[in-house]
Image (spheres, helix red, strand yellow):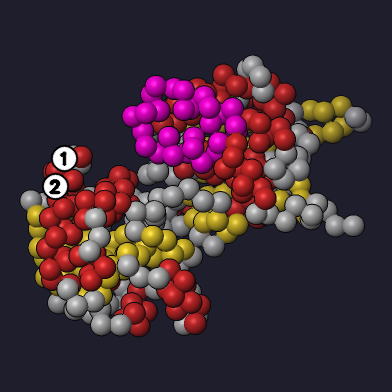
Amino acid sequence: MQNLGGAVIPMQINTDKINFLVGDEAILCSIQYNPALPMFSDKMLGFLEDLSRKLMDDKRSRSYQDVMSYAYWIRKSSLERIKKSYNTKLARIGRGVSFHIAPSNVPINFAVSMTSALLAGNSIVIRVSDKDYEQVSIVCDAMNELLSGKHASVRDYFCIVRYPHDDEITSQISAMCDIRIIWGGDETIRRIRSAAIPPRAIEMTFADRHSIALIDSDYYMSADKKEVAKGFFTDTYYTDQNACSSPRLVVWFGDRIEEAKESFWKELLLLVKEKYRMEPVVAVDKYAAFCGLAMSAGQARLQSDENYIMRVRIDELTDNVLDYKHGGGYFYEYNAKDIEDILPVLNKRCQTISVLGIDKDNVRDFVIKNGVQGVDRVVDLGQTMALEFVWDGYNMIENMTRIVHA
């Protein structure tokens, strides 16, 4: 859009290939001229509060744990508590248009990214995956109902779209954005970065990463083993280990390691066989990943539980062991004598450490003391998929605002 003598002329964007899930062509072409809103504006807090209610009332949501978790996360009391944790004495306002490239492997991620941008005071343009996830439809249906009714006053702040990989469209939207948020693999990020953003625009990228779990065997043996299995299943199989926060490596500590392992994997197998559908190609690909590691390292031992769980026992942790990762229940195992043993895998690609029976503060202090270049989160086992406004080291809301200083 250009301003010529006071007349506003919409920016021309090729919309022939764009499928609008929320918003329309007119909104997309004029969205950059929306006024920025204050951080935690009443307008967006009210919208998200009503979106939470509508999602919880939708019977379809009950079939999707991620949708229900998102709806619970954005309820009024939750957002008010989050707001109080921020320094609202600083005058923070949105930067303008936020352009989000959502990942293809975590259906509800687009809504999480959107929420951070809205609370920061920005308009949103989100490209969602071509995969036909019902979770996306559920959220977009609820949004459309609200934006055509009670919250019509903020309708022009929303565009959620699908389009095939198209450099022209990505470049046109990038050219008008003030924030670009890219969720995806390293190659996706490299490709999208070829599309220029304005000089004052900022970019946040969420690249390929992996995560690990630390378990104290003595603590595990006195824990509720079924609950531990449920938590670990949520961390891993719920997304087929496709989420960066899903543990790929399990590191065991303590004096009862072999006993704990036998119980842990047995309980998990029972749950996996009940709740997880194993595709034949996944089993083949997991074996191929193991062969790749074996040819590289030469000291890996495989144990497979009916292909539902493949465990690769390794005797040494190296900085490249997780280059041979795979999903669908493919895990590396290591018996540690000391926490110092895990340092080689805590490189820039390591995102989350989940713990059971190990103090989170001690692990965080260990990371800081050793100047670890990776690791942005330390959480309890079973909580790696928890929705948060701080991700990959970014404070999402603050990063999407600017400070008006007087």
Q: How many marks?
A: 2
Q: Is residue 182 left or right of residue 324?
A: right
| CB atoms of marks 2 and 1 within 8 Å | yes
Q: Does residue 271 appear anywhere in the picture? A: yes
User: What percent of the width, then of the height, locates residue 125?
Assistant: 60, 36
Disc 2 residue type? Leu
Callout 1 environment at 10 Å: few (<14), some (14 to 19), or many (20+)?
Answer: few
Q: Which mark is residue 274?
A: 1
What residue is disc 2 on?
Answer: 270
Q: Quadrant of the N terminus?
A: top right
Furthest-top residue in this view? 149
Residue drawn at x 90%, y 57% is: 406
Range drawn in magenta: 48-75
Q: Position of residue 327 (x, y in %)?
A: 26, 53
Residue 262, given in percent of the width and then of the height, sits at: 12, 63
Q: Is residue 313 magenta?
A: no
Residue 341: quarter of image: bottom left
